[in-house]
């Protein structure tokens, strides 16, 4: 009916159909921003883009957000803290201890309303992310799998090219800026003889009844390995865990990604002399052999190489002398691989140059400290896959950390492409100290992303006048030239380098020093100087910087009595301490300020 009605205007129906299907006339939709993945990081960026009124779309392969959490963790208990009560009414402070909520203006969208459990069930996260997207009306295209991403150079584009995204139906999408928030989804596998006998964490049974009376070998020693062991601990004959490194306990390393207490029940049975055991060896030095009864044996790989025969335990002499590990002579019924996850590089064309080729080359894409790809301008990695910036130093690989780095990336692009300045709050200079103290005691971003994000206090003095002072994250840039600069940040010992800090944009050519003690504390360097300037949540060990003797040291400023010793700077120089004192201005000058966050 539609074709016949249109025929008088367009001619024969066949001509109309030919025009509609002509490839030259089917122009793919072009957007300013595209987001791959509707997990926590993708939805967080979508929220900021929507609030700013930007042209964007989110592509999600599943029918609902948070598809990762529909399956993982396999045993359904999250290790992210859901602390519902802190005794405080301050929302910013409470976010310090809420590891699951995304940032939004709606207080109903706090995770505390979705679960009462301290360690919530993964289904609660799926429900929360679904409500977050629906309540805020985020523009997500579900059931859309992006199968290939490449570049199309165009001088009219913001970044000199457009990103071309092709979905599973062959439909093409274009955008100027691409956010990849797909997380780590490819199981990490180590190639060694017999590795094919190992069942993957992603597919092994989670029913304890399937392991009754069995001998189990688990490859790996992270949370997924211990989570798997915890599930079957009460029904197996014994469990051995094999890894090349020792167990890292989060309470000892202060890193949330290490083994958490909720999963370490096997350590009790091991330390209390039960049958369970922890074994150390590089997997590439071993071989797993299968005997005629379907049992699995572990032996050094060179035994297999010397035999020069098939991989059968019946044809290989296994070690039986006094020097071998007696416990491992017993064959195993099951071998389970729990070796973590890697980034999926398969959908990205080589022209994007995402693979780094360094130590993180297999696990993470190569990105700058601004979370922008080193190979393609305008391509940003968000969420768990961006953790290489602060790996084992801060919380950037987890919701309670990357919700703030996502916000920093958004603010960077607001400035770069829309000339929107970093948010600021003005205040008199007399309130500067109290504002710093309040930020140190309350701010959640500084608290979770210690050593990565910071507040910058900018002082400008012109002709005896001191215009507004600003307090902003270190990723803020593009401010006019300022004469005085301070940095306000939280640091954790052994995670930071006391003479290395990256400041952005206009913050150039000044010296600094900072005080670093053996506790989590605020750091306020004087007059910073950096040789390399990087934006957006810059980590302290990113890029190349030059250290010079601080002005404070030249003036003989000393640390207050009772403060801890300072660490050595590069070349054996000692960074100068900072002590509270009244800010000095020229006679007759007036002071006021602003706070940027």
Image: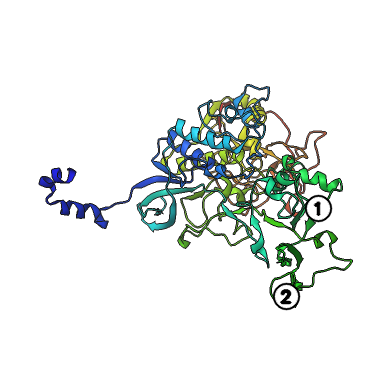
**Residue 269's disc number:** none
Q: Which residue is mark 1?
A: 277
Q: CA distance from mark 1 to mark 2?
A: 27 Å
Q: Residue 177, position in %: x, y?
A: 43, 48
Mark 2 surroundings within 10 Å by alpha-carbon count, few (fewer than 14), some (14 through 19), many (20 or more): some
The image quarter in which residue 452 lies: top right
**Residue 305's disc number:** 2
Residue at the image point whose x is 60% and y is 38% from the top: 122
Residue at the image point whose x is 66% and y is 59% from the top: 198
Relative to 525, 425 lies left or right: left
Q: Quadrant of the C terminus?
A: top right
Q: How is the image coloured?
A: rainbow
Q: Secondary structure at mark 2?
A: helix
Q: Which one is in front, 394 or 38? A: 38
The answer to whether 475 is drawn above or below residue 14 in the figure is above
Q: Secondary structure at mark 1?
A: strand
Q: Residue 395, position in %: x, y?
A: 64, 42
Mark 1 or mark 2: whose residue is earlier in sequence: 1
Q: Quadrant of the N terminus?
A: top left
Q: Residue 556, position in %: x, y?
A: 76, 40
Relative to 324, 95 lies left or right: left
Q: Which one is in front, 360 or 130? A: 130
The answer to whether 546 is drawn above or below residue 116 in the figure is below
The image quarter in which residue 302 lies: bottom right
Instruction: Tell me, yes or no, if residue 585 can be seen here.
Output: no
Q: Which one is in front, 262 or 138? A: 262
């Amino acid at each position: 009916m539609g074709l016949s009605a249109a025929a008088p205007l367009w001619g024969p129906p066949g001509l109309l159909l030919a025009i509609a299907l002509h490839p030259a006339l089917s122009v793919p939709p072009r957007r300013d921003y595209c987001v791959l993945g509707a997990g926590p990081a993708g939805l967080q960026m979508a929220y900021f883009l929507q609030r700013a009124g930007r042209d964007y779309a989110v592509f999600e392969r599943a029918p609902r957000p948070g598809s990762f959490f529909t399956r993982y963790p396999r045993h359904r208990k999250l290790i992210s803290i859901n602390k519902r009560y802190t005794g405080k009414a301050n929302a910013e402070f409470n976010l310090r201890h809420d590891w699951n909520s995304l940032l939004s203006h709606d207080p109903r969208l706090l995770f505390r309303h979705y679960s009462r459990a301290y360690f919530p069930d993964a289904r609660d996260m799926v429900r929360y992310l679904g409500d977050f997207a629906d309540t805020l009306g985020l523009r997500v295209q579900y059931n859309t799998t992006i199968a290939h991403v490449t570049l199309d150079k165009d001088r009219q584009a913001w970044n000199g090219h457009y990103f071309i995204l092709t979905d599973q139906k062959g439909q093409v999408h274009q955008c100027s800026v691409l956010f990849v928030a797909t997380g780590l989804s490819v199981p990490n596998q180590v190639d060694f003889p017999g590795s094919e006998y190992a069942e993957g964490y992603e597919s092994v049974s989670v029913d304890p009844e399937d392991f009754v009376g069995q001998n189990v070998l688990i490859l790996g020693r992270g949370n997924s390995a211990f989570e798997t062991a915890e599930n079957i601990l009460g029904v197996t004959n014994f469990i051995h865990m094999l890894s090349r490194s020792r167990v890292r306990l989060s309470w000892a390393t202060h890193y949330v990604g290490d083994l958490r207490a909720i999963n370490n029940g096997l350590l009790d049975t091991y330390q209390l002399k039960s049958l369970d055991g922890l074994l150390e060896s590089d997997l590439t030095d071993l071989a797993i052999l299968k005997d005629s009864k379907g049992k699995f044996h572990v032996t050094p790989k060179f035994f297999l190489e010397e035999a020069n025969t098939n991989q059968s335990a019946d044809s290989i002499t296994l070690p039986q002398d006094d020097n071998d590990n007696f416990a491992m002579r017993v064959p195993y019924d099951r071998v389970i691989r729990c070796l973590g996850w890697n980034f999926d590089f398969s959908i990205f064309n080589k022209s994007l140059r995402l693979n780094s080729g360094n130590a993180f080359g297999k696990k993470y894409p190569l990105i700058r400290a601004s979370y922008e790809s080193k190979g393609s301008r305008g391509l940003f990695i968000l969420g768990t896959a961006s953790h290489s910036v602060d790996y084992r130093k801060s919380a950037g690989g987890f919701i309670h950390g990357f919700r703030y780095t996502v916000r920093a990336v958004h603010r960077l692009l607001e400035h770069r492409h829309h000339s929107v300045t970093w948010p600021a709050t003005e205040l008199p200079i007399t309130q500067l100290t109290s504002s710093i103290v309040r930020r140190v005691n309350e701010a959640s971003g500084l608290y979770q992303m210690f050593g990565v994000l910071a507040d910058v206090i900018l002082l400008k003095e012109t002709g005896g006048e001191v215009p507004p002072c600003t307090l902003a994250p270190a990723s803020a840039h593009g401010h006019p030239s300022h004469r005085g600069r301070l940095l306000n940040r939280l640091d954790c010992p052994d995670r930071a380098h006391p003479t290395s800090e990256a400041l952005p944009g206009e913050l150039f050519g000044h010296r600094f020093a900072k005080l670093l003690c053996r506790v989590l504390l605020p750091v306020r360097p004087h007059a910073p100087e950096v040789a390399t300037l990087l934006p957006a949540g810059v980590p302290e060990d990113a890029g190349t910087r030059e250290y010079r003797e601080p002005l404070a040291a030249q003036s003989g400023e000393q640390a207050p009595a009772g403060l801890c010793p300072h660490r050595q700077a590069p070349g054996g120089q000692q960074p100068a301490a900072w002590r509270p004192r009244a800010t000095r201005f020229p006679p007759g000058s007036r002071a006021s300020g602003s706070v940027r966050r």
